[in-house]
Amino acid sequence: MTLDRTVLAFAGFMVLLSVLLTVTVSGHFVWLTVFIGLNLIQSAFTGFCPAARVFKALGIKPGCAF
């Protein structure tokens, strides 16, 4: 799996996890969903993605976007 697909899969997992936590634990977890969305938007404009840096350091092979 390339870095691009890993980042997308991780973002999707985190969104689903934050929705699950919002429904089952506390409504305040909706802020995690907001944070993830804002991070996705900023990375679309700037090209900087903290998750991509972490996954790259873990040895995931680079893709086209990152």
Image (cartoon, grey):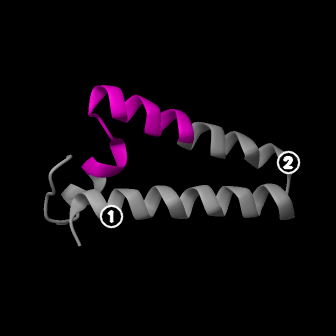
User: What is the magenta segment's predominant secondary structure?
Assistant: helix
Q: Residue at x 67, y 56 (%)?
A: 18
Residue neighbourhood size for the residue with mark 1, other residues' Cα within 10 Å, grouped as few (<14), some (14–19), many (≥20): some
**Which numbered disc, 2 or 1, marks the residue closer to the eye?**
1
| Amino acid, disc 1 | Thr
Whether the magenta-drawn stretch holds residue 51 is answered as yes
Q: Which residue is drawn at 45% across and 39% down?
A: 40
Quarter of the rendering containing residue 7: bottom left
Q: Which residue is drawn at 45% across and 33% down?
A: 41
Image mark for residue 15: none
The boundaries of the magenta stretch are 37-53
Q: What element carries label 2?
A: helix
> Total number of numbered labels?
2
7 up-or-down from 49: above or below: below
| Amino acid, disc 2 | Gly
Q: Is mark 1 on a helix, strand or loop?
A: helix
Q: Position of residue 57 (x, y in %)?
A: 20, 57
Q: Quadrant of the N terminus?
A: bottom left
Residue neighbourhood size for the residue with mark 2, other residues' Cα within 10 Å, grouped as few (<14), some (14–19), many (≥20): few
Q: Name the residue under label 1.
A: 6
Whether the magenta-drawn stretch holds residue 25 is answered as no
Quarter of the rendering containing residue 5: bottom left
Q: Where is residue 38 in the image (x, y as percent from the top left)?
A: 53, 33
Q: Name the residue under label 2.
A: 27
Give the distance between the C-alpha atoms of the residues marked 2 and 1, in whole angstroms: 28 Å
Q: In this view, does 2 lie to the left or right of 22?
A: left
Q: Where is residue 64 in the image (x, y as percent from the top left)?
A: 15, 51
